[in-house]
Image (cartoon, rainbow, N blue to C red):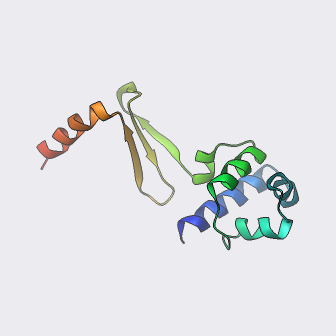
Amino acid sequence: MDRNSIVASRIKEIRKNRNILQKHIASHLTISENAYSRIENGHTQITIEYLYLIADALDSKVADLLGLEKTADTHNNPNLVISQLNEGSFNITLAPSDYLSLKELLESKK
């Protein structure tokens, strides 16, 4: 399953869990219900603009639609956040000042 399909199925899941009709989201995006259905079924690429509009219509965050889950806030350090992506991969966000420390730590483990 490609990333667009994963995001599309996540959007559909959130919409159904909140009992929101496709026509409501389509109206918010100012597109036809059929065009929105194609987005939600993974047949149309989701643009960044639509992603934000869909999140707004679902009263959600873009991170939720993308399936990002915060899994660790290492030692309460706001400069280092590890998020797990739905596909089993991780996204690590850190401040530039912490990059060298992390690089040194990883190299010392070799």
- At 73% from the left and 49% from the top, the residue drawn is 53
- At 78% from the left and 56% from the top, the residue drawn is 16
Q: Quadrant of residue 37?
A: bottom right
Q: In this view, does 22 lie to the left or right of 91?
A: right
User: In x, y percent, where is residue 77?
Assistant: 37, 27
- At 12% from the left and 50% from the top, the residue drawn is 110
User: In x, y percent, where is residue 2?
Assistant: 53, 70
Using the image as rendered, state which of residue 33 and residue 65 is in the foreground: 33
Picture layout, residue 50 above or below residue 95: below
User: In x, y percent, where is residue 109?
Assistant: 14, 45
Using the image as rendered, state which of residue 15 and residue 42 is in the foreground: 42
Q: Is residue 57 left or right of residue 109?
A: right
Picture layout, residue 30 above or below residue 94: below
Where is the N terminus found, in terms of image quarters? bottom right
How many callouts does the rendering have?
0
- At 52% from the left and 45% from the top, the residue drawn is 69
User: In x, y percent, where is residue 19?
Assistant: 83, 52
Using the image as rendered, state which of residue 93 and residue 71 is in the foreground: 93
